[in-house]
Amino acid sequence: MTLILIVEDDDAIRNNIVRLLKLEGFETAAAPDGRQGLELARSGRPDLIISDVGMPGMNGFELLDAVRADRALVNTPFMLLTALDDRESMRRGMTAGADDYLSKPFNRAELLDAVNAQLKKKARVREAIDSGVAAGEERLRAAFASRIGGGRPAQVPIEVIPPSAETEELSGATVLVASIRNFTSLAEKLNAAEVSQLLTEYFERTSEPVLKNSGRHIKFIGDGLMAVFSDTTTGSPLPAS
């Protein structure tokens, strides 16, 4: 079920948004300020965050900054609630990375239209990411297959090793994590095929130096890549699990 987090210090507005969304079948979580909202976002991983701008303690802009700085939440769609004709808040929010804004007061139709637009956009981006990841993994498998020759299976990333193969226990490994900055904003400007092509080329180019420098395990995570480098001379083979 789709989870939507509402962060609003006005009890009446917050409760009304929760009620309207629940009537449409959405699961909701709610907080009266940015600090509590951030805690709920980190624990619940919502599909969409709707936040007021002016709140005590951590305001909406500060919450937006915290969400965009959190690797686990960075791609979460974020909608700001602003006062009617508050163009400064609108401009500041969009510059900071908000996906949309809704002016108060708003009606049921306006709220649902904005919510559904963000959820559909997220679904399109997610589909494109999955397609790009699959294509990147396939190309990486082909690249490794051409390099294995008579080498050990440990030269292949974990994702490519069959269950019957052996993997190595690594000690003192170095982990590299890389991703595309502002990927969500970029992906929203492209169609699904373009996003898939972007990710495929990105994974292909970032995987090449990993392979050249004896990276042993590569995993694609959304728009990111994780690789492990280790001196395995002291490692002992273990059955793959």
Image: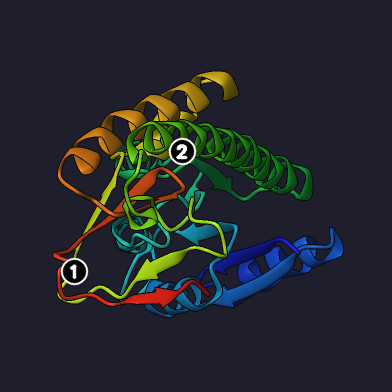
Please tell me how crowded label 1 is: few (under 14), some (14-19), or many (20+) other residues with Cα within 10 Å.
few
- Give coordinates of residue 44: x percent, y percent: 55, 74
Q: Nearer the viewer, residue 172 or 38?
A: 172
Q: Quick check: 43 above or below 88?
A: below
- Give coordinates of residue 240: x percent, y percent: 49, 71
**Of labels 1 and 2, the one closer to you:** 2
Q: Quick check: 2 above or below 142?
A: below
Residue 111 bears which disc, if any? Answer: none
Residue name at image x 43 percent, y 67 percent: 166
Q: Earlier in the sequence, mark 1 or mark 2?
A: 2
Which quadrant would residue 18 be assigned to in this image? bottom right
Q: Name the residue under label 2.
A: 141
Residue name at image x 53 percent, y 31 percent: 135
Q: Is mark 2 on a helix, strand or loop?
A: helix
Q: Mark 1 points at which residue?
A: 173
Do the numbered discs 1 and 2 sit on residues whose CB atoms are within 8 Å? no
- Give coordinates of residue 83: x percent, y percent: 48, 49
Q: Is mark 1 on a helix, strand or loop?
A: loop
Residue 87 seen anywhere in this rendered image of the structure: no
Please tell me how crowded label 2 is: few (under 14), some (14-19), or many (20+) other residues with Cα within 10 Å.
some
Q: What residue type is labelled 1?
A: Ala
